[in-house]
Amino acid sequence: MFAKSTIYLNKNSINRKILAAIAVTSTLSITLPAQAVSLDIGGLRFSEVSGDFRITGGRVDSSIFVIEQEVTGPNINLFMAIDGLLNACPGVGGCYFRFQSVLTNQTGTPWALFDHELQEIYGAPSPEEDGLSFAQQIPQLRPFTSNRFGAVDEVIDVRDYVNYSGGVVAPGDTVTFNYVIADTTPLNRFFLLQRPNFQAGGGGFINPTPQPTPSPTPENGGIIDPEPSPSPEFPIDGGSNAAVPEPSTILGLLLFGAIAGGVKLKQSR
């Protein structure tokens, strides 16, 4: 942040006016989408620019600018314009304010990452030493936190990113992000781009929804189990292969035994 802030704080007034005129001309050359809703709080104006989201409320809470939003998708490149002169200007580090972005997930898709990027010109990355940053190199303004994500990754060289990971925001849930925005440029407008499921450093969007595993088929190289063999049929008596005699045969044998037994009894007398 020191490099970004001092480049403007140490310029004379003539150079500042020249830079301002160039920046204004560059900004006006970009065609912006029609803004839908603007919210004025604490001397700053927060406006919807593009993307499927809407600002539902806001307030200043203990010097923290809190902006509540609802994200519906499918366009999750969420651009917000921020206008106004910043009031907190310490001796070193430029002008900054604490910001809390509160977003409700109404997209139907879980969020596993969430990226925040600052842009001085709409649609153009914020380079080094343009005066706009997430208050880089001012450690007393950290840590940046979230109620849903545990890890924070910052990219500050060729772009200005703060990327949150290590958590999930399910559809219908609300997430909060806390960080600091610093601006020492002579312009009073810049842009905040918020992107759920976007990788740090411009790595692109991810799909956090697990895809179903296809069933194996010969076409996709899968191995199909053969048809199961039929279960063997076992005899009712548990495995004996001897023939079971008919009931009449059993009765005949019993009768013969009785007669033979009677004859033996008579002979013994």
Image (spheres, rainbow, N blue to C red):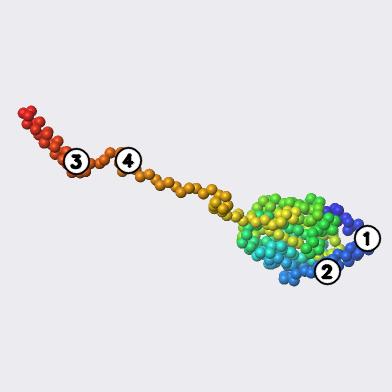
Q: Secondary structure at mark 4?
A: loop
Viewer-nearest of discs 1 and 2: 2
| Residue at (48% x, 48% y) in the render | 226
- What is the CA distance from the residue labelled 1 to the residue labelled 2? 25 Å
- Is the residue under label 1 in contact with that under label 4 (CB below 8 Å)? no
Q: Secondary structure at mark 1?
A: loop
| Residue at (66% x, 64% y) in the render | 74
| Earlier-in-chain disc, 3 versus 4 | 4
Viewer-nearest of discs 3 and 2: 3
| Earlier-in-chain disc, 1 versus 3 | 1
Q: Secondary structure at mark 2?
A: helix
The answer to whether residue 105 is above or below residue 216 is below
| Earlier-in-chain disc, 1 versus 2 | 1
User: Which numbered marker is on residue 238?
Assistant: 4
- What is the CA distance from the residue labelled 4 to the residue labelled 1? 105 Å
Q: Nearer the viewer, residue 145 or 25?
A: 25
The 10 Å Cα crowd at callout 1, few under 14, some 14 to 19, many 20 or more, is: few
Q: Secondary structure at mark 3?
A: helix
The amino acid pointed to by label 1 is: Asn
User: Which numbered marker is on residue 250?
Assistant: 3
| Earlier-in-chain disc, 4 versus 2 | 2
The amino acid pointed to by label 3 is: Ile
Q: Is residue 165 left or right of residue 218?
A: right
| Residue at (88% x, 65% y) in the render | 22
The amino acid pointed to by label 4 is: Gly
- Is the residue under label 3 in contact with that under label 1 (CB below 8 Å)? no
The amino acid pointed to by label 2 is: Leu
- Is the residue under label 2 in contact with that under label 1 (CB below 8 Å)? no
- Place of residue 123 in the rendered image (x, y in percent of width and height, measured from the top left): 78, 63
Give the residue at mark 2: 28
User: Which numbered marker is on residue 12?
Assistant: 1
